[in-house]
Image (cartoon, rainbow, N blue to C red):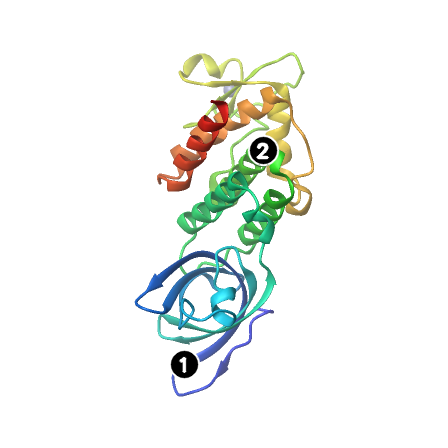
Amino acid sequence: MASSVYSRSGRDDVTIKTKALVIREYIVGESDKYVTLFTKDLGKIQALAPKAKKYSGGLATGTQLFVYGEFMLTQYKDTYRLLSVDILDMFHDLRKDLFCLTYSSYIVEFVAAVTEEALVQEELLLLTLITLKNLSQEEKRLRLVRRIFELRALSLLGFMPQIKKCVDCEVFLTETEQTTYDFHVEAGGILCSNCQKHYIHTLKISYGTLYTLRYIMATPVERLFKFEVSEQVLKELEHISEDYRSYYIDKSFKTLDFISKLHQLEKK
Ligand SMILES: [Zn+2]
């Protein structure tokens, strides 16, 4: 726990310092606010931010959605109370465009849904921060950035698809650009040409999509977003990611409805 400092200030409450991202905020009563923090050292926690609604500056600024900073908190039993925030990044640019804001809201809604209280998930936090950074800089690539995030996050959550060998007989897949591959969501990966005959509802994907999936699973997070794909590969990735996420993460997301509505309006 290198970045956190624990010290005892009273008989029972403890002061904690940790880096964290605000993934949810909600008002309680007249002036207080609760925030859900995705922290580096404590996983997901809820914290009370006293007077954060009423007064500008201080905790009001530091407890807005998407703020990443160094948070000082006191802990008493299961309750965290926010003392101060040293803001490192506010991700201001996420608010410059409605599409960008909606995609970013989905990212943090997803993270809030899949993380567990007090379970440290440092790599998922890093992935989330880098995804938000990319969304803020790449308005034209929102669809791709979202799918890269989802597929890598699912892999970090223990649902990495098998894409090197057949998910049934485990034979290594032969690779040629002319071949199409059969992805099976429930089986959890690619099927070879022999095994696919025994399955229904496979998703046909191109070599380019298989190659992209492998890149998304294996590349260090810092370099993860540095590529382009064709519209066909993007559509196949969207299809896989959509079906894969709904099968393995049994949750609905409010922001996804909003994303669909925005894209429908765009087409009109
Ligand atoms: Zn097989």
> Where's the N terminus, which quadrant?
bottom right
Residue at 43 percent of width and 69 percent of height: 52
Counting from the top left corner in percent of width and height, residue 100 is at: 54, 41
In percent of width and height, residue 55 lies at 45, 71
Sequence-first disc among 2 and 1: 1
> Can residue 172 be seen in this snapshot?
no
What's under tag 2, amino acid-wise?
Answer: Leu
Q: Judge from the rendering whether residue 160 lies leftward or rightward of residue 140; answer left or right.
A: left
In the shown orientation, is residue 263 left or right of residue 246? Answer: right
Checking the image for residue 13, the label placed there is: 1
Disc 2 residue: CB within 8 Å of ligand 1: no
Where is residue 176? Give x, y as percent: 67, 16
On screen, residue 179 above or below 185: above
Query: Looking at this view, is 73 or 154 the one in front?
Result: 73
Q: Compared with residue 16, is residue 93 higher up or lower down, i.e. above or below?
A: above
Give the residue at mark 2: 144
Asked whether disc 2 touches disc 1, contact meaning CB atoms under 8 Å apart, the reply is: no
Q: CA distance from mark 2 to mark 1?
A: 45 Å
